[in-house]
Image (spheres, rainbow, N blue to C red):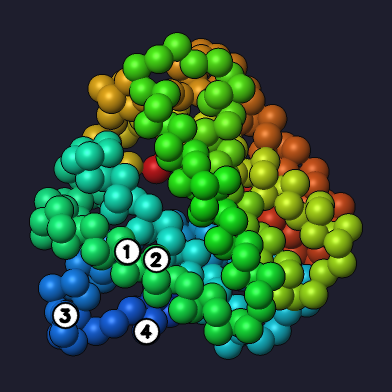
């Protein structure tokens, strides 16, 4: 296994991000098709930029484990980004986090209106399932449904709302983070691996990798909300504190939060090295998540 340099890793990420952006543009309805306002709102948020970590993880898992059909994996990978974007649109609404900025521009409901933002999120949710169904794999569809349902992202979001303004334990924070953020990241590597036809032992190991980076991702989000650069983040810092959100450093303190995130990344890299891949993009992706500043 050859180690991946920082430069080659960033090049890999950028190439994959561009690839995903092209695909998303292709799969989204054109903005001049009726209902054009809804389609503009969908495209506005999806094409606003972003790291595209979830589709890149799915593509990487699929190809690393021997998958070779882009027509199979591409719609599935993009479905993950559509779900992620719909969740951001709804998270930003006045009834939730009431945010004005996302990725350096006005949030969807500020650019359009609340009703349009709700419908844009709903429409992206529906389109995501239309895309993932193209794989003709009931198992893969169930993976996404479970990741975003009441045992996954939505359950974590509900727990997050209920935890606002309360004294929360670390177990409660872990419940929220592993579901609200971690479940979709976990599913991203799983669907790629499943479509590549891995055995159950390999699937279990890559699931562990996804769980580690998923939790680390949210811990780092919590840290960046406290000490991040607003220009790099593309959104206001300090919103978690303002909204009295349950956060990892709010329970453990910043030093332990950093140590725990670093430890999770190290554990994820160790798992990835078990696969003895020629190009270990999994390790590079874990390092990127651990070192990100936006």
Dot label at residue 26: 4
Label 2 belongs to which residue?
125
**Residue 122 at x, y percent in the picture:** 32, 64
Where, quadrant-wise, is the N terminus in this rendering?
bottom right
Mark 3 against mark 4, which lies toward the viewer? 3
The residue to which callout 1 is attached is: 122
Q: Is residue 180 above or below residue 103?
A: above
Q: Between residue 15 and residue 94, name the one nearer to us.
A: 94
Q: Are marks 3 and 2 in contact (CB under 8 Å)?
A: no
Mark 3 sits on what residue?
Answer: 35
Callout 3: SS: loop
Mark on residue 56? none
Q: Examine the rendering and report whether any part of residue 98 can be seen.
A: yes
Sequence-first disc among 1 and 3: 3
Q: Are marks 3 and 4 in contact (CB under 8 Å)?
A: no
Q: Residues within 10 Å of mark 1 (few under 14, many from 20)?
A: some
Q: Residue at x 46, y 79 (%)?
A: 130
The residue sitting at 69% across, 56% down in the picture is 282
Separation of disc 3 and disc 2 at Cα? 17 Å
On screen, residue 8 versus residue 202, left or right, reads left
Q: Nearer the viewer, mark 1 or mark 4?
A: 1
Q: Residues within 10 Å of mark 2 (few under 14, many from 20)?
A: some
Residue at 81% from the left image edge and 52% from the top image edge: 205
């Amino acid at each position: 296994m050859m180690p991946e340099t920082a430069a080659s890793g960033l090049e890999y990420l950028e190439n994959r991000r561009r690839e995903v952006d092209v695909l998303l543009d292709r799969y989204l309805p054109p903005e001049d098709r009726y209902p054009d306002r809804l389609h503009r709102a969908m495209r506005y948020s999806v094409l606003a930029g972003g790291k595209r970590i979830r589709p890149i993880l799915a593509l990487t898992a699929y190809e690393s484990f021997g998958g070779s059909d882009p027509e199979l994996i591409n719609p599935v990978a993009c479905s993950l980004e559509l779900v992620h974007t719909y969740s951001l649109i709804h998270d930003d609404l006045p009834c939730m986090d009431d945010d004005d900025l996302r990725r350096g521009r006005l949030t969807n409901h500020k650019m359009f209106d609340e009703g349009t933002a709700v419908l844009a999120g709903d429409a992206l949710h529906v389109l995501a399932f239309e895309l993932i169904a193209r794989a003709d794999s009931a198992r893969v569809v169930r993976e996404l449904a479970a990741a975003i349902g009441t045992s996954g992202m939505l359950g974590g979001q509900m727990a997050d709302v209920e935890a606002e303004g309360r004294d929360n334990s670390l177990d409660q924070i872990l419940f929220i983070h592993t579901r609200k953020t971690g479940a979709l990241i976990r599913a991203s590597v799983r669907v790629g691996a499943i479509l590549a036809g891995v055995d159950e032992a390999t699937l279990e190991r890559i699931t562990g990798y996804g769980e580690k980076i998923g939790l680390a991702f949210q811990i780092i989000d919590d840290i960046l909300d406290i000490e991040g650069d607003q220009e790099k983040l593309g959104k206001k810092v300090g919103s978690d504190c303002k909204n009295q959100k349950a956060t990892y450093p709010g329970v453990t303190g910043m030093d332990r939060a950093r140590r725990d995130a670093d430890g999770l990344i190290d554990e994820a890299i160790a798992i990835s090295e078990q696969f003895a891949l020629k190009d270990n993009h999994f390790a590079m992706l874990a390092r990127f998540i651990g070192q990100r500043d936006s």
